[in-house]
Image (tube, rainbow, N blue to C red):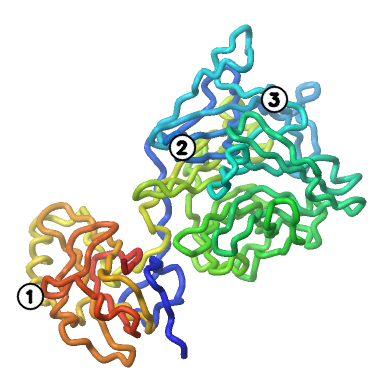
Amino acid sequence: MAMIEIGSTKQLFFDDFLIESLTNAKQGMNPAVKVDNNPILRPECPWEGNFMRPNSVVFDPAEQIFKMWYFSSTTTVRLENGKPVPGGASGLLWDTRGEVRCLATSEDGIHWERPSLGLVEFEGSTDNNILPEKENLPKVPGFLDMQESDPAKRYKAMIMIGDTQTRGMQYNLFYSPDALDWTPYEYNPVIDTGQELGRWAGRFQGWDPIRETYYVTMEASHHWRGPYGKRLVGRAESPDMIHWSEPEIILVPDEHDFPDTEFYSMPVILYEGVYVGLLWIFRTTNVTHHPEVVFSRDGFHFQRNYREPFIPRGGSLSDFDSSSVYAETMIVHGDRIFTYYIGTNSRSPEIALELGDKSMEGIGLAVSRLDGFVSLDSGKGWVTKDRSEEELQHIYTERQVFGEPESFGQMTTRPFGFSGSRLYLNTSMAPIAAGPGLGEVRVEVLRANHKKLPGFSFHDADPITESGTSQVVSWNGNSDVSALANQPVKLRFYFKNAKLYSFQFK
């Protein structure tokens, strides 16, 4: 079998690609943690109504700030003679009025401000953050194209136009230097299905540096007369955002899903050579949504190994996100991953009618540590904060005596070749109430035939006992592994009361 070449690419543990064996340990998905000030943006200004959702969130490296384009509206259940009007996919009809598009900015991605743009008059004043509406032009950016060399085309957007029920589906392409002033592509539309009824609703757009192509993930649904009669996820590609491939269905519910499960949409980011998607799980009978984290190595075949919510819904109706969590944007910033989402406590008009003026929708944020989607967790119990100081000291003393390999969870990799001179780990130790750290990680280097390398054994390995995203591995004080580069080796990780998120040679 050919040796796997990983070079200096960071290795994550979401699948078994590099894992040969795992003992007294498990792979686990780590849900993102909601920030304390959620929702980070809620309807507060007179022009913002009661519903609010982000259209796009970016970190602009040129200005070193976060920017969020969002829209707000007043959305209520349609009434006639004081009674709800039946209709629509959910049973009742909505009334939406006063819709506006707005811009918010932030220095840290968590605390947001509404800049006074002075562009649109509202109730006699332009002291607001409302963006102007321009007919037949994009209201929000599709994405910030980081590989675009033309400053006039930094932002790109494809907007669906026309009536899909009568003339098929059309998409127009637009460019902008600042997401305010847009220029349409000269030969729009770039997609036109003609008389064939449209079946796809494109949503998340971007550049794929692995396949070196633009892509869009989209919904194929009964809204657009999809062939399966339910909402699914597809992908299409383009070398220039002008000429597009036929959409290909890439995710469908399986036998492990509830019968009423549909896939509403899926934002995707390229993360350390892996496609990470947040799949919108839609339950049609209880009208709820939550995101499930999925992974792929080619952009088309996604693994759904972790079926629990990546961002759980709120636990009570008073929570703004108790009904649905729609994951919108993932941004890697420093040593954290920000996931922005729409939260609502009234996905259906029936619930909105029951909640009355407490029905709302806001913008939430959940945060993960760097590489923190999935981890290898040591197999024997994490030490929790409810342990007494005496118990903690007893456990620590026992571990000092019983520090043999058999007392650790273990993971052994397949043979691989690497480039670099040092090995770095992203790891966290068990939370404790007092005393010295109880978590520990050691790394052993083996030959491809599983024989131990002198000087790199378990007993040579220097224990790592602190949490960190870039911990240097060493043996008897020496961290230089350049002599082993470009030859087949294995790693065996020993870890207890610890999580391993990734490793990397560099």
Tag 3: residue type? Glu
Q: Quadrant of the C terminus?
A: bottom left
Q: Is residue 259 above or below residue 72?
A: below
Residue 62 is marked as 2
- Closest to the observer: 385 or 190? 190
- Closest to the observer: 25 or 452? 452
Q: Secondary structure at mark 3?
A: loop
> Mark 1 — residue?
401
> Mark 3 — residue?
133
Q: Residues within 10 Å of mark 3 (few under 14, many from 20)?
A: some
* Alpha carbon separation for disc pair 3 and 2: 26 Å
* Alpha carbon separation for disc pair 1 and 3: 70 Å
Q: Residues within 10 Å of mark 2 (few under 14, many from 20)?
A: few
Give how far across and how far down residue 46 sits, in percent.
Answer: 57, 16
Mark closer to the observer (1, 3): 3
Give how far across and how far down residue 400 sits, in percent.
Answer: 8, 71
Q: Earlier in the sequence, mark 1 or mark 2?
A: 2
